C-alpha cells in the first residue's frame, strides 16, 4: 500500500476500523522502515505471521535517543526534541510535516474540548519556551493563533501578567484554557491563589527538577484548592508521538482517534495483558505514519475495557520526561 492511500485511511479512522488500518500500517512500516524491520528480524518474527495488533512488536522508546527513525526516505521539516534533564540524552523525533502534526493535534483536542477558537488560550510553559524543538510549544502556538480572543498568549515568568489576564477574562466571561507545566502551575498557585470561573486548567506534567515529584492526585488537590476548581485536566503526550490523550480530571485518559493503548507484561515485552491489569504502556499512534507507530514506553499504566487508561508511574530506570505525568 502506498503512503498517500494509507494516509487517507488514517485521517478517517474510527474505533470500528482502527485495527484494520493498524495492521495495514504495520505491514507498511515493517517493509519501509529499515530500523523497525531490523528490530523485527532480531526478534526472529515474520511480519506475515502477525495478524492482530496484540501480536505487533513495539519499538522501545529509547531508540529515539540514539537512532534516526524514519519510514521511507524524506527530508524532515522539524525535529522534536525531548526536554530531559541535565546530563540525559535527548530523544529526537524526525517529523516530515509539522502541518500534519498540528492538524492531528487539533482533531484530537476538538474531540474532547471543541474548537480552540472558543477559548482564551493561556500557555504557562516556561521551560519549553526556553528551548527549541518542543512539540508542545508548536501545538500551543497553533491553538493560540486559532483563538478568537486577543487575551490568548504565552507566559514565561510573567506570572503577574497571567494573574491579571485571568481576572480580565473572568470579568468579560471569556472561557479560558490554562495550559501549564506542573511546576509552573504550582508556583503560580502559591503566589496567586484565586477563585477561577469558566476556566479549564490543563497540566502537561513535568517537574524538571524544579520541585519534588508529587503524586498526581496530590498535585491536583493543591491546584484545585488554590483555584477553587472541581477538577484539574491533564494532557498526555510526548516527543515521540504525534497524537495525544486527555483526562478531564478523574485520572482516566481518553485517546484521540489515531491513538490506542495496549498494556504489556513488564517482564515479558512481547506479552500483552488483558484489561484491568497493571503493566508497561505500549502506544499505537497511527498518525506516526512517517516514523514508527508502535512504541513501547517507559510508563506504567492500566487499560480499561472501553479503551481509556490510567498512568500509574514510570520505570525507575527511565529518565524523568518533561511531558510525562507524575507518579500516581
Image: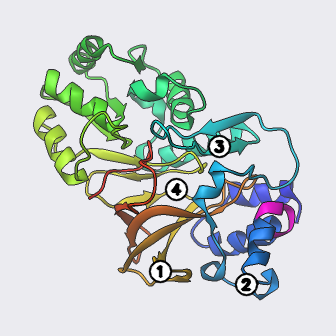
Residue 62 located within the stretch drawn in magenta: no
Question: Does 193 sit left or right of 211 as displayed?
Answer: left
Q: Which marked residue is nearer to the observer: mark 2 or mark 4?
A: 2
The residue range painted magenta reads: 30-35
Tell me where residue 45 sits by quadrant: bottom right
Marks 1 and 3, Cα distance to the nearest angstrom? Answer: 27 Å
Question: Does 164 sit left or right of 128 as displayed?
Answer: left
Tell me where residue 195 sits by quadrant: top left
- Label at residue 198: none
Could you classify mark 2 by the number of other residues whose Cα lies within 10 Å: few (under 14), some (14-19), or many (20 or more)?
some
Identify the main secondary structure in magenta: helix
Q: Find disc 3 in the rendering and name its residue.
A: 92
Q: Earlier in the sequence, mark 1 or mark 3?
A: 3
Q: Find disc 4 in the rendering and name its residue.
A: 256
Q: Nearer the viewer, residue 273 or 25?
A: 273
Q: Earlier in the sequence, mark 1 or mark 2?
A: 2
Q: Quadrant of the N terminus?
A: bottom right
Q: Is residue 33 visible?
A: no
Q: Find disc 1 in the rendering and name its residue.
A: 267
Marks 1 and 4, Cα distance to the nearest angstrom? Answer: 28 Å
Could you classify mark 1 by the number of other residues whose Cα lies within 10 Å: few (under 14), some (14-19), or many (20 or more)?
few
Badge 1 marks a residue whose secondary structure is: loop
Question: Does 274 sit left or right of 16 as displayed?
Answer: left
Badge 2 marks a residue whose secondary structure is: loop
Could you classify mark 4 by the number of other residues whose Cα lies within 10 Å: few (under 14), some (14-19), or many (20 or more)?
many
Q: Which marked residue is nearer to the observer: mark 1 or mark 2?
A: 1
Q: Earlier in the sequence, mark 2 or mark 3?
A: 2
Q: Find disc 2 in the rendering and name its residue.
A: 50
Amino acid at each position: 500500500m502506498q503512503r498517500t492511500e494509507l494516509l487517507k485511511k488514517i485521517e478517517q479512522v474510527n474505533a470500528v476500523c482502527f485495527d484494520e488500518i493498524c495492521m495495514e500500517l504495520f505491514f507498511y512500516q515493517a517493509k519501509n522502515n529499515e530500523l523497525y524491520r531490523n528490530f523485527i528480524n532480531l526478534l526472529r518474527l515474520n511480519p506475515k505471521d502477525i495478524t492482530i495488533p496484540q501480536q505487533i512488536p513495539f519499538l522501545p522508546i529509547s531508540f529515539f535517543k540514539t537512532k534516526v527513525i524514519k519510514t521511507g526516505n524524506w527530508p524532515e521539516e522539524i525535529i522534536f526534541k525531548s526536554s530531559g534533564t541535565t546530563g540525559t540524552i535527548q530523544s529526537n523525533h524526525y517529523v516530515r510535516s509539522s502541518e500534519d502534526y498540528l492538524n492531528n493535534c487539533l482533531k484530537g483536542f476538538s474531540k474532547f474540548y471543541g474548537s480552540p477558537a472558543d477559548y482564551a488560550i493561556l500557555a504557562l510553559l516556561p521551560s519549553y519556551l526556553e528551548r527549541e524543538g518542543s512539540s508542545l510549544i508548536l501545538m500551543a502556538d497553533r491553538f493560540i493563533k486559532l483563538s478568537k480572543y486577543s487575551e490568548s498568549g504565552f507566559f514565561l515568568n510573567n506570572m503577574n501578567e497571567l494573574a491579571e489576564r485571568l481576572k480580565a477574562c473572568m470579568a468579560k466571561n471569556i472561557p479560558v484554557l490554562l495550559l501549564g507545566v506542573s511546576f509552573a502551575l504550582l508556583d503560580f498557585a502559591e503566589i496567586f491563589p484565586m477563585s477561577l470561573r469558566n476556566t479549564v486548567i490543563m497540566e502537561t506534567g513535568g517537574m524538571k527538577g524544579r520541585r519534588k515529584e508529587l503524586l498526581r492526585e496530590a498535585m491536583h488537590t493543591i491546584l484545585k484548592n488554590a483555584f477553587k476548581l472541581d477538577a484539574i485536566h491533564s494532557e498526555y503526550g510526548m516527543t515521540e508521538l504525534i497524537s495525544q490523550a486527555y483526562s478531564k480530571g478523574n485520572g482516566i485518559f481518553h485517546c484521540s482517534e489515531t491513538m490506542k493503548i495496549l498494556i504489556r507484561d513488564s517482564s515479558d515485552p512481547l506479552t500483552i495483558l488483558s484489561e484491568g491489569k497493571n503493566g508497561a504502556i505500549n502506544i499505537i499512534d497511527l498518525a506516526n505514519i512517517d516514523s514508527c507507530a508502535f512504541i513501547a514506553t517507559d510508563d506504567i499504566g492500566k487499560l480499561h475495557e472501553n479503551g481509556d487508561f490510567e498512568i500509574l508511574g514510570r520505570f525507575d530506570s527511565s529518565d524523568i520526561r518533561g511531558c510525562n505525568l507524575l507518579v500516581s
